[in-house]
Amino acid sequence: MVKVLTVTLCIVLVLTITGQELRHTINLQQAVALAHQLHEEIAIAKNTTGAAQARVLTSLGLSQPAMSLSYEFIPRKSALNSFGERTFSITQAFEFPSVYYLRYNKSRAEVELAGQGTRQSILNVTAKVKSAYYDVLEKQYLSLIADENLAITEDFAHKAELRHELGEAANIELLTARVQFTEAVLKKQIVQNELLAARGQLAYAIGMVQSDTNEYLNVIDSLVFVNHELQLQVLLDAARSNNPVLQITEMNTRALHAEHSIAWSSLLPSFSVSYALQTNENSGNLYGVTFGMNVPLWFMFDNRGKIEESAARLDAARLEAQLANRSIKKRIETGYTEYQNAIRQARFYRNDLLPQSEKIFEIAAKSYDAGEMTYLEFLQAKQTLNQSRVTYAAALSAYYQAIIALEELTGLTVLE
């Protein structure tokens, strides 16, 4: 009975697993590099930066010149060529020179602002890729545990059947062994499906377009503990220098400060120069030059409104920068606490609990084979080992996810 059940369930499991075909093998560094090339978020951010750079030229441009052609002193019911005076003129208006300098400064600040936006996109995508990558590693680790558990339960189901046939094991022991084996097969299927989903999520985080639903990524690393000692003050100092959100709020304040200066510059006059060629009934070789100046006499309305609006926006930007500093600092402190808890737990399971659970299971297996322990007692030892391994995998995942979150906040690269 056990052999038939074993063959049937294993065929289902093999078909489920082999129905997927490996197409890509990748490590963490390759995954991050590929995401930087493929992901749309980064491409969009780079295009935004390019648009900001193009606006620098716009900030230095003059307004378009105005040209006019006029015919005057024409007798009634006569054609245009009966004019008494014909004038062709071209007029160029320009603002106070300091305005162009201020606009240039604003546009340069916007370029730096867009550049920090690109850095933020790169950090966001990198964090998502690393998070998905380590999720795949966790699922691969759980898959190995499920494989080992499946082999153990199959072996003991076979032993229970033999013991039952020899009259050395009760019927309840045989039924329990069969149930445990069936559960192990189903658990393997569940873990395998979760692994496939995690691989698909990694491909999505990288920005890969999967034309075939059977395509997925196979990572070549494994989930092991690597000690990374992080210091809170080092993280805070790095964030002040590298965090794009803080840089963005600073650049935004600079841009709005330049905009506020431009608003004050609206109180300055603007100028115009006109050059005209004239022809009249007495001479065809005349010219004229006109110098003009526009003075903002009604500054109490439009100009004052622009100044007050820009001042309010500048004050709001300064408060946003202050809030961003406090928020990032708090998030780093919280993330560092999570990192400390995760590394303590990972070390505890790696150095203490997991070796003890493995030792208990080893003794229990030998005692069961020697007939010195019941199957239920052996089952308890096996469940303790499985739970320790699963919890250790969760602790390792939490440890690496905490580091990834701190990397995104500080701009540091810890995991490579």
Image (cartoon, rainbow, N blue to C red):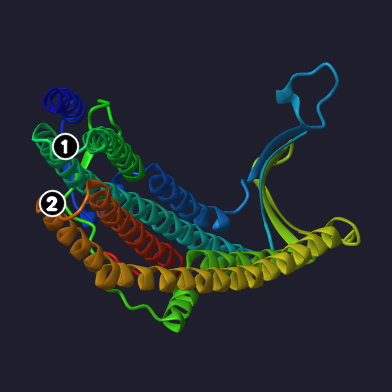
Residue 346, quarter of the rendered image:
bottom left
Residue located at (43% from left, 71% from top)? 341
Q: Amino acid at mark 2?
A: Gly
Res. 101 visible in picture:
no
Against 318, residue 170 (above or below) is above
Indicate the position of residue 249 as horizontal and vertical percent values. 59, 66
Q: Position of residue 169 (x, y in %)?
A: 17, 39
The answer to whether mark 1 and mark 2 are in CB contact below 8 A is: no
Residue 132 % position (x, y): 34, 49
Q: Earlier in the sequence, mark 1 or mark 2?
A: 1
As rendered, which of 357 and 329 lies closer to the eye?
357
Callout 2 environment at 10 Å: few (<14), some (14 to 19), or many (20+)? few
From the image, state whether disc 1 or disc 2 is nearer to you.
2
> Distance between the Cα atoms at labels 1 and 2?
15 Å
Q: Residue at x 41, y 51 (%)?
A: 46
Tell me the tag on residue 362: none
Using residue 381 as the reference point, say whether residue 119 is left or right of it: right
- Find disc 2 in the rendering and name its residue: 371
Quarter of image, res 307:
bottom right
Residue tagged 1: 157
Closer to us: 399 or 165 = 165
